[in-house]
Amino acid sequence: MKTRAFLPAFAVALFAGVAINSAAAAEVEALLPTSLELAADTQGPAPAKATAASKKAPALLSTERLHSDPEVFWKGFLTGLRGFEQFHNPIGSPIYFESPLISTELRPLFIHHVFPQSSQVRGGQVNVIAAQARVALTDRLAFIATKDGFSFISTGILGTEDGWNDIAAGLKYAFWVDEANEFIATGGVRYEFANGSSRTLQRGDQEWSPFLSVAKGFGDFHAVAGVSYRIPEHPDKGNEILHWDFSFSYDIAKEVLPGFAPVLEFHGIHYLTNGKALALDVGGVDYNNLGTTGAEGVSTITAGVGARWRLSPHASVGALFEMPLTRAGNDITLNRLTFDIIFTY
């Protein structure tokens, strides 16, 4: 870069030396170092900004963006809200634990969920392959598609089946943004369509789920929390369910492992009403709203340990292993492994 800056200045000096007398040429030559200093000043801030970005949101491979956030149509479209890149997205409870950040991203994910033998489904497992999508419409508003994909399920009472999942989508809006204090609060709502395969316990009932999520940073430590309320369109087909979630992450070694953060999460599911769809005393956790007849008053609380690793401003990977803190037979959760990759615009 210094060579490129020197050549235009040198050409100007040479031209001036040929065109004017020797005294004037001497004056031009005296001014030449000043031109070089100005060129150096022009280049100087860029590395400084890169260093600041590296300290705020370190990454394993690169801290430089592939684009300069071009304005498309209007401010924030696709680019979303900048200034919170140091936060790590939650991993567990991916359908209902929505990050308060506003961004455009694609999130392929895999879930391996094991049912306890002591529950009414008599053990088994479900493997889910899905991809979430989010599109920043402005720097505060985003479209979210949080549920889709394909499930492979095996239980003691159903046998082995596979089929498509229901689809859920909605909007979220960041109504409180305080970049200086590393705080953001976002509200939103999802709608789930009953369009999946009944063979895999989908197609229960359409439901609305308003939610609130917040994030707060304390240096290298970051906390994200959320609460969702699931309301079935037909109370006899679905249960009303309350979700709450916490995710804590800490950048432990920015110099040695840039972008790497251990993650500790807690998730709670509380069934508030009974349905009339299935004669079971357990619910569908976050997999589906089964509308069971005896789930009212049942609660499941899980704890998860994992990590997220930011590879660049455009990509990160995460993994979390969860186990229940409540009695496993209360619901259909023995343990769960969640793995994701997030590609961000």
Image: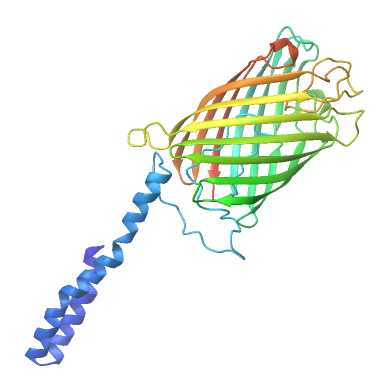
Foreground pick, 2 / 188: 188
How many numbered circles does the render carry? 0
- On the image, the x and y values in percent for residue 60 come to 39, 38
Foreground pick, 206 / 108: 206
Residue 130 in which image quadrant: top right
Quadrant, the N terminus:
bottom left
| Colour mapping | rainbow
- On the image, the x and y values in percent for residue 122 come to 76, 9
Q: Residue furthest top?
A: 118
Above/below status of 65 relative to 304: below
Foreground pick, 133 / 138: 138
Above/below status of 321 relative to 30: above
- On the image, the x and y values in percent for residue 156 come to 77, 10
Q: Residue furthest left?
A: 22
Above/below status of 26 relative to 328: below
Above/below status of 299 relative to 223: above
| Drawn side of residue 290 relative to residue 173, left or right | right
Residue 215 in which image quadrant: top right
| Drawn side of residue 186 relative to residue 58, left or right | right
- On the image, the x and y values in percent for residue 177 come to 58, 51
Residue in view at x 12 percent, y 80 percent: 29
Residue 240 in which image quadrant: top right
Residue in view at x 69 percent, y 11 percent: 327
Foreground pick, 110 / 97: 97
| Drawn side of residue 25 relative to residue 307, left or right | left
